[in-house]
Amino acid sequence: MSDPEPFDVHKIRHKLKLHNDTGDRQLWENKKDAVCPACEDPFSELLISEQLENSFNRPDGRFCVVREESRILVFTH
């Protein structure tokens, strides 16, 4: 079984607004109903982190996590 394709934020960049980029961590807002790869529902925000250790404030609702080889993606709904 092959690994799934990594989530390519650049393919949907036109649907997102970048709020913060520290080099190893990015926060994006979904402006046009891009869908979460974990549940296939539109998401509100996307946090992409290449850091080994992360700490997050608790989101107000449901969230999905996608783990890739060198990063994690957290989608809030």
Image (cartoon, rainbow, N blue to C red):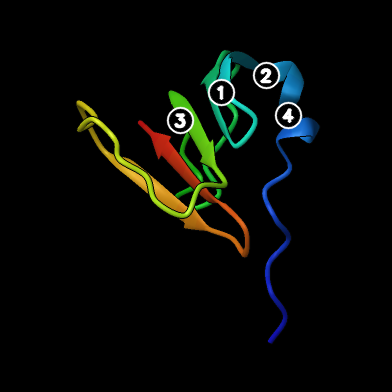
**Mark 1, secondary structure of its residue:** loop
Find the distance from the CA under tag 4 to the CA under tag 1.
Answer: 10 Å
**Mark 3, secondary structure of its residue:** loop
Please state if 72 lies on the left or on the right of 65 as rendered: right
Labelled pair 2, 1 in contact (Cβ < 8 Å): yes
Mark 2 or mark 1: name the one nearer the start of the chain: 2
Q: Nearer the viewer, residue 12 or 53?
A: 53
Residue 40 in percent (x, y) is at 51, 46
Labelled pair 4, 2 in contact (Cβ < 8 Å): yes
In terms of image quadrants, where is residue 55? top left
Which residue is depicted at the point 20% across and 33% down?
58
Find the distance from the CA under tag 1 to the CA under tag 3.
Answer: 7 Å
In terms of image quadrants, where is residue 43? top left
Residue 12 is tagged as: 4
**Mark 2, secondary structure of its residue:** helix
Residue annotated with mark 1: 33
Residue 15 is tagged as: 2
Q: Amino acid at mark 2?
A: Lys
Find the distance from the CA under tag 2 to the CA under tag 1.
Answer: 7 Å
